[in-house]
Image (cartoon, helix red, strand yellow):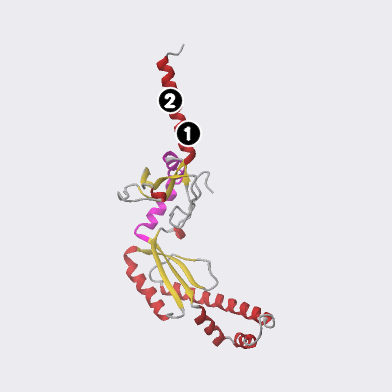
Amino acid sequence: MATSEQTKKQKRENTEKSEKSDKKQTVGVYVYGIVPADVEPGDDATGVADGKVEVVASGDIAALVSEVSVDRPIGKPEDLPLRFGAVLTDADAVKEELLSAHADEFAAALEQLEGKAQYVVKGRYAEQAILREILDENEQAAQLREEIRDKSEDAGRQARMALGELVNNAIAGKREEDTRKTVDALGDLTDSVNRREPTHEEEAVQVAVLVDVDRQDELEEAVGKLAEEWDGRVELKLLGPMAAYDFVVTQNPAGQG
């Protein structure tokens, strides 16, 4: 027959188990990236929802993580997760499902990326400038522009549609040419380039490059020269350094989509 002390102890254990179970249902571990095991985040390092960033290590590799409520939406602009957006149940899952399961893969990637960072060169055409350029170069486009100049929207509908298609095709051709020119201009700084798909109809260029961080000044100079050459035609930006998302492909951890 159980004593009162045994009964109290059992109740405490059941309460602790219940609390632990509730926490697992509402709190997960948000993974920001894979790093060497000797990396230490700063005391002021904060993650999603101001969670404290900590290290979960396994052998020579580790993950930067913080606790996060699984009830909040993940993937806001201020969130910086791994490419696959990993949210795991707890630190043990990070070790077993992520680090241990992909130890060789991560170690090889870290070795490949040591001393390097990803930078992204993005450019968008100035709408009026690129339109003038196309009209100057393309006689058919210029004729269509004249044809619709004094017509109502209904009367010039077909001509406007034809002109729109022609302009879009011309921009696609210029985008290809300007992207190739950008890659050539950065060729001496990197041998790893990812040409991204356009995200806007007036996008001129969007390429990710993997560059030694100690050559960032050279990269900025090269992009600056392009920006000067395209002044008034293309608004050019250099983003980075950032994690090398475009140059490392990993499998999803167990259970992650």
For the residue labelled by badge 1, is the local secondary structure a helix, a strand or a loop? helix
Sequence order check, earlier mark of 1 and 2: 2
Q: Which residue is mark 2?
A: 13
Task: Identify which residue is drawn at 38% across, 77% down.
Answer: 225
The number of discs equals 2
Foreground of the two, 198 or 244? 198
Q: Which secondary structure is most common in the magenta stretch?
A: helix
Foreground of the two, 64 or 219? 64
Foreground of the two, 49 or 143? 49
Tell which residue pokes out farthest to the top in this image: 1
Residue 68 x/y as whole percent:
44, 45
Task: Identify which residue is drawn at 46% across, 26% down.
Answer: 14
Residue 193 x/y as whole percent:
45, 66
Q: Is residue 60 magenta?
A: no
Residue 33: which disc?
A: none
Q: Is residue 70 above or below residue 12?
A: below
Amino acid residing under circle 1: Ser
Tell which residue pokes out farthest to the left in this image: 43
Quarter of the view holding residue 140: bottom right
Distance in Å between CA atoms under marks 1 and 2: 12 Å
Span shown in magenta: 91-116
Q: Is residue 97 magenta?
A: yes
Quarter of the view holding residue 13: top left
Residue 183 x/y as whole percent:
45, 72
Task: Identify which residue is drawn at 40% across, 16% down.
Answer: 5
Q: Is residue 58 above or below residue 227?
A: above
Q: Is residue 45 above or below residue 201?
A: above
Q: Characterize the local packing of mark 2: few (<14), some (14-19) or many (20 or more) Cα atoms within 10 angstroms.
A: few
Residue 21: which disc?
A: 1
Amino acid residing under circle 2: Glu
Residue 169 x/y as whole percent:
59, 77
For the residue labelled by badge 2, is the local secondary structure a helix, a strand or a loop? helix
